[in-house]
Amino acid sequence: MIIVKGLASGKETELTVLPESLDENLLTWLRAQGVTIASSCDGEGVCKKCVIQNGWLTCVMTVGSFLKKAPHGIVEVSYL
């Protein structure tokens, strides 16, 4: 499970992670789940707008690598 916390709104959304999603790009996966993540470079790692907590870029991580780095499963997005 991944919990998306909007720091601006205080809203939290719980998302279920299926085993087959672990190798998916985190930016792409979050967008497919209906989460608005900014990225003007379309996931190339250049614009750095898809940043979440700890300065991590969602476009250069898989869902599985995120969960290894953040076992609590919380994605904090400042502008949501």
Image: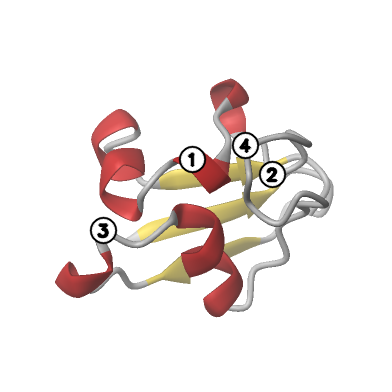
Split into 4 quadrants, where in the image is the N terminus? bottom left
Residue 14 seen by the camera: yes
Mark 3 or 1, nearer chain start? 3
Residue 51 horizontal/vertical position (percent): 67, 36
Numbered disc in front, either 4 or 3: 3
Of residue 22 and residue 1, the one placed in the foreground of this image is: 22
User: Residue at label 2?
Assistant: 50
Residue for point 72% across, 66% down: 36
Give the number of the disc on residue 23: 3
Q: Tell me the CA gap for discs 2 and 3.
A: 18 Å
Give the number of the disc on residue 60: 1
Q: Tell me the CA gap for discs 2 and 4.
A: 7 Å
User: Residue at label 4?
Assistant: 52
**SS at mark 3 in the image:** loop
Three-letter amino acid code of the residue under disc 3: Asp
Left or right of residue 26: residue 56: right
Three-letter amino acid code of the residue under disc 2: Cys
Residue for point 39% across, 57% down: 2
Of residue 44 and residue 38, the one placed in the foreground of this image is: 44
Q: Tell me the CA gap for discs 1 and 4.
A: 12 Å
Q: Residue furthest top?
A: 54
Q: Is residue 9 above or below residue 33?
A: above
Question: Looking at the image, do the residues carrying marks 2 and 4 touch, with CB atoms under 8 Å apart?
Answer: yes
Residue 80 horizontal/vertical position (percent): 78, 54
Three-letter amino acid code of the residue under disc 1: Val
